[in-house]
């Protein structure tokens, strides 16, 4: 199983980014995928998850209304659309399998850096 996150970068406050998580070795028809992040000096935290039925679970209240998750099963890829970015969103973002979207990730991808700064 491999998960490859990409799409990070430097963006100004208020800007947008879309992260991608390309998954191989398993089918999104059967697995939930979550996005997690780790800011400097802080513990890793859950952000949002999408299950095999397309239901979304927010782990982080502060991203509601700004972040959304979607998936393309044909491409076996999950996306994290981040709008109205704030400096406190700066972190390394990871995707992971997250069975049932209960915040219990197991297979991790490598992270992608998101920096929100003017």
Image: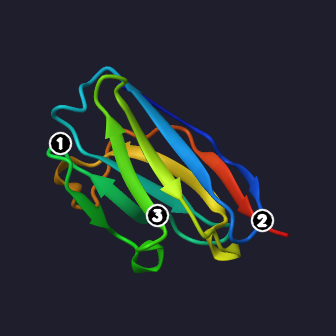
| Residue at the image point whose x is 38% and y is 44% from the top | 96
Residue labelled with disc 3: 67
- Percent x, y for residue 114? 67, 55
- Percent x, y for residue 105? 32, 50
Judged from the image, the secondary structure of the residue bearing numbered disc 2 is loop
| Residue at the image point whose x is 69% and y is 63% from the top | 15
Q: Give left or right: position of 6 versus 36.
A: right
Is the C terminus in the top left, top right, bottom left or bottom right quadrant?
bottom right
Residue labelled with disc 2: 12
Is the N terminus in the top left, top right, bottom left or bottom right quadrant?
top left
Mark closest to the chain's N terminus, 2 or 1: 2
Q: Give left or right: position of 96 versus 87.
A: left
Q: Nearer the viewer, mark 3 or mark 1?
A: 3
Residue 104 has which mark?
none
Q: Nearer the viewer, residue 80 or 59?
A: 80
- Percent x, y for residue 82? 54, 59
Mark closest to the chain's N terminus, 3 or 2: 2
Q: Is residue 112 above or below residue 37?
A: above
Q: Is residue 47 above or below residue 23?
A: below
Q: Nearer the viewer, mark 2 or mark 1?
A: 2
Q: Is residue 63 above or below residue 104?
A: below
Q: Give left or right: position of 26 versus 61.
A: left
Q: Quadrant of residue 77?
A: top left
- Percent x, y for residue 12? 77, 65
- Mark 1 surroundings: few (<14), some (14-19) or many (≥20) residues within 10 A: some
Judged from the image, the secondary structure of the residue bearing numbered disc 3 is strand
Label 2, label 1: how far apart the Cα atoms are: 33 Å
Mark closest to the chain's N terminus, 3 or 1: 1
Residue 52 has which mark?
1
């Amino acid at each position: 199983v491999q998960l490859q996150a990409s799409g990070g970068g430097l963006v100004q406050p208020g800007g947008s980014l879309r992260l991608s998580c390309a998954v191989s070795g398993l089918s999104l028809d059967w697995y939930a995928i979550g996005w997690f992040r780790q800011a400097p000096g802080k513990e890793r935290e859950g952000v949002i998850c999408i299950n095999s039925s397309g239901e979304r679970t927010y782990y982080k209240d502060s991203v509601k209304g700004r972040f959304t998750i979607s998936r393309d099963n044909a491409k076996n890829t999950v996306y994290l659309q981040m709008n109205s970015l704030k400096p406190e969103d700066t972190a390394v973002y990871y995707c992971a399998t997250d069975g049932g979207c209960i915040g219990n990730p197991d297979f991790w991808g490598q992270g992608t850096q998101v920096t929100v700064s003017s």
